[in-house]
Image: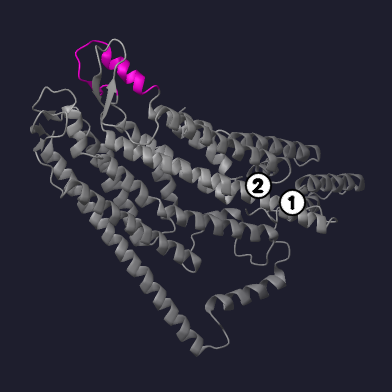
Amino acid sequence: MDWGALHTILGGVNKHSTSIGKIWLTVLFIFRIMILVVAAERVWGDEQDDFVCNTLQPGCRNVCYDHFFPISHIRLWALQLIFVSTPALLVAMHVAYRRHEKKRQFRKGDQKCEYKDIEEIRKQRFRIEGSLWWTYTGSIFFRLIFEAVFMYAFYFMYDGFRMPRLMKCSAWPCPNTVDCFVSRPTEKTVFTIFMIAVSSICILLNVAELCYLLTKFFLRRSKKAGNSKQQPNHENKEETKQNEMNELISDSCQNTVIGFSS
Amino acid sequence: MNWAGLYTVLSGVNRHSTAIGRIWLSVIFIFRIMVLVVAAESVWGDEKSAFTCNTQQPGCNSVCYDHFFPISHIRLWALQLILVTTPALLVAMHVAYQQHREKKLLVLTGHGDAKHMEEVKKHKMRIAGSLWWTYVCSVVFRLLFEAVFMYIFYMLYPGYQMMRLVKCEAYPCPNTVDCFISRPTEKTIFTVFMLVTSSICIILNMAELIYLVVRACARRSQHNSNPSSGKGSFYGHKHSSEYKQNEINQLLTEQDGSLKDMLRRNSGLQEKGDRCSAC
């Protein structure tokens, strides 16, 4: 169970996302997860082995490393990426539930023969409206919150994003103030800034997606209100279509909805 | 065979679980197994090599490490996750057995073609009858294993906090020696994280157990108030398969040759039985 498995799980959600959501997912996988796995993990790989303190006192190096790096950048980013990608699973669960309901209706032999077979239900893309809209918006909201929380935790723990070359440590059992040297500080600074920048881009994409969804929602609402004023007999286009279909069905569609017979 | 293999095996069980069961499975794979593989293993990676004692005495380092860490956190969590996920295989086995029986029945009644076999494989089993008992047992075992491992953890490592310094006087260390643990704060953070997710999983399991018991009682009371219809009852599955058998026997004696009619009636029966399967 690794990043590849997460990619498989989340790839399914991609179908039901908005365009901004798809861009966000791509940025997440290519510019954050892939960079983390392919580059950043190597840079931080020897962080403790090559953390050198100017003392022979046993234990001083361990204690100073622990004091300055309560949790490694790499682990923080890994946790951030896991938490930020999981709200999308709420959407996946909701879509799976809707699909299940449609399959049940189909099997019962309901008079809605929009679907020729179960395969079509499985492949169908659901529109983001109704309760799915709320789930989707909720998931974006959670994503934003998690991103913000982790950015704050990062800033709080590491007091800015720069990695210094030298740290002065006086924790016991170090005999007095001891100089400790961090390995690859510049490279770490570069990657830290990169990851922070991509994080900010993801936050912006999420905010944009939220605004887009809200705008779409209000537009649809005003369109509905406008339509109902013009045509009081037809509540909306879908119901007109449904009535037509019901008429066609009662004329010709007697034995269509039986999975076995085809 | 690694975590990915386990994931493949268990995602098949997912189909026949309740909604809470699916949430539990997602929490296990994403917040426990994935965090273990992707983050925690690298934190504990150098736990022995970076365990330093303030002595030059050969062997003291190894002995002290062994004294304070009889079994590493990572291995304990791996064992816990394997044991906690495997009761779901009981359910998988039971479902496979039921599917085998259904296939045999179809073959006996002359519907042994590939399409019907596929349909048997794809349709979701209701958690009723003996499958209910198997499912409840698997949830109980999960709870038991989680509780046992939490207790073992508490016995081996009282408290969740990892100390920076431990004092060791095991032979051959000359006297009380200071030993320093690598990355104690990071280890504490991950220990707390794994404990929290473990507790969430225990709560989910208990909720699932309560849900199953309440549903069974509701079905039973429905059955008692409406004894003529056996389909929505606690023993609904048993009754519906016997009912199906009677229908098939009747059809065979009437020599109803039309496959379509037989299938339509068969599917009609099955769908009525599956009415409450969305759990």
Tell whether label 1 touches label 2 (CB within 8 Å): yes
Q: Residue under circle 2? A: B123
In the figure, B150 relative to A222: above or below? Answer: above
Image quadrant holding the N terminus of chain A, namely top left
**What x and y, as percent, mark residue B18?**
60, 49
Q: Indicate yes or no whether the magenta region holds residue B60.
A: yes
State the extent of the magenta-drawn residues as a range.
B48-70
- The circle drawn on residue B270 is 1
Q: CA distance from mark 2 to mark 1?
A: 10 Å
**What x and y, as percent, mark residue A145?**
33, 58
Type of the residue with mark 2: His
Query: Residue B103 falls in which quadrant of the image?
Result: top right
**What x and y, as percent, mark residue B200?**
48, 46
Q: Indicate yes or no whether the magenta region holds residue A52.
A: no
| Left-right relation of B238 to A87 | right
- Residue found 52% across the figure and 36% down from its top: B147
Q: Chain of mark 1?
A: B
